[in-house]
């Protein structure tokens, strides 16, 4: 079965201003040995056909960072559900509806690349063999209140677990409770599915997104994939992993990732 990677690179990086800007958001900052987060995300999956989802203003910038990728530019900003639908349907049209797509945020940092690839391969294999939507969860190492959580259910295969529910970013007390419970992981926004399974799930739970086309893109709701689909679907499983993940969503996280921050740059 064919596999492909879709890098989500349309974000504005507002939490790292003034280092990040509308013209040069977080995923394009070359702060890690001269590389950007987008480039490092690409290198993890460069053995696959790679597509980049971004908006029109970043098309050339994305190609400058990753010349070998296929860029699918959104006609307007409409959040992750329309973007994923538009891009996955285009990948399906090019490569076949049974193509398994891994949707990966292009602005996250991962320290243990080898372990991430092992976890991703596990997710690919399960999505190839089952009509499910797979999400990769990150084993928490602290009661972080900046991340959403996933409550895990019973195992359905080796290191694959049924998903009970998505949990919004908690307060400190609930985050501590989740870590103690041991059956919660961070929601990293990483998904793996066959295009046909994704399309069928959208048709059932979010038909207005399932009908998206480039021509009527601005008419569809601006909504995240979690709200539009993942919280509603019953065929969601999770592959947990621990690979030194961060969404680089704060200055502290940026510093911990080992980024080379230019002198004189301070948060607003």
Image (tube, grey):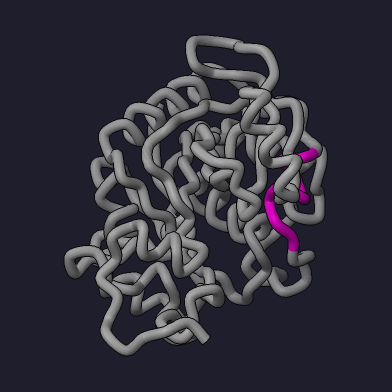
Identity of the residue drawn at 62% across and 67% down = 214
Is residue 19 toward the left or the right of residue 205 in the image? left
Looking at the picture, how far across and down is residue 116, in whole percent?
Answer: 35, 35
Q: Residue sitting at 44 percent across and 77 percent down? A: 25
What count of labels does the image hold? 0
Left or right: residue 173 compared with residue 46: right
Instruction: Report the residue at 54% width, 49% height from top.
Output: 88
Q: Position of residue 117 (x, y in %)?
A: 32, 34
Establish if 236 lies above or below 55: above
Q: Is residue 227 magenta?
A: yes
* Quarter of the view holding residue 209: bottom right
Taking the spot 81% from the left edge, 41% from the top edge, the residue there is 205
In the rendered structure, the answer to whether residue 10 lies left or right of residue 122 reads: right
Quadrant in which residue 198 is drawn: top right
Query: 201 above or below 250?
Result: above
Q: Taking 228 as reference, is 18 above or below it? A: below
Residue 250 at x, y percent in the picture:
50, 66
Q: 246 above or below 233?
A: below
Is residue 97 visible in the rendered image? The answer is no
Quadrant into which the N terminus falls:
top left
The span picked out in magenta is 223-231
- Of residues 222 and 158, the one nearer the viewer is 158
Taking the magenta stretch, the answer to whether it contains residue 20 is no
Work out whether residue 77 or residue 92 is closer to the camera in this orientation and state it.
Answer: 77
Residue 172 image position (x, y, % from top left): 70, 48
Residue nearest the viewer, comparing 267 with 7? 267
- Magenta segment's dominant SS is helix
């Amino acid at each position: 079965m064919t596999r492909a990677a879709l890098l989500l690179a349309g974000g504005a990086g507002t939490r790292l201003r003034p280092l990040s800007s509308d013209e040069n958001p977080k995923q394009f900052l070359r702060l890690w040995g001269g590389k950007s987060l987008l480039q490092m995300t690409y290198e993890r999956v460069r053995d696959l056909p790679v597509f980049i989802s971004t908006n029109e203003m970043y098309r050339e910038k994305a190609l400058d960072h990753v010349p070998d990728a296929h860029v699918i530019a959104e006609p307007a900003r409409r959040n992750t559900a329309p973007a994923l639908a538009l891009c996955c349907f285009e990948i399906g049209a090019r490569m076949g509806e049974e193509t398994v797509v891994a949707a990966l945020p292009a602005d996250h940092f991962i320290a243990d690349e080898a372990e991430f690839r092992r976890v991703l391969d596990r997710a690919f294999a399960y999505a190839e063999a089952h009509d499910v939507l797979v999400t990769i969860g990150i084993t928490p190492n602290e009661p972080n209140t900046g991340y959403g959580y996933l409550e895990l259910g019973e195992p359905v295969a080796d290191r694959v677990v049924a998903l009970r529910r998505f949990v919004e970013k908690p307060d400190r007390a609930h985050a501590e409770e989740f870590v103690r419970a041991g059956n919660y992981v961070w929601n990293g926004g990483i998904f793996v599915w066959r295009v046909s399974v994704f399309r069928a799930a959208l048709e059932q739970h979010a038909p207005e997104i399932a009908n998206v086309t480039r021509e009527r893109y601005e008419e569809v709701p601006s909504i995240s994939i979690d709200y539009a689909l993942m919280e509603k679907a019953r065929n969601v499983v999770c592959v947990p992993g621990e690979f030194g993940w961060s969404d680089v969503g704060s200055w502290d996280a940026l510093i911990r990732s080992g980024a080379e921050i230019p002198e004189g740059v301070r948060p607003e």
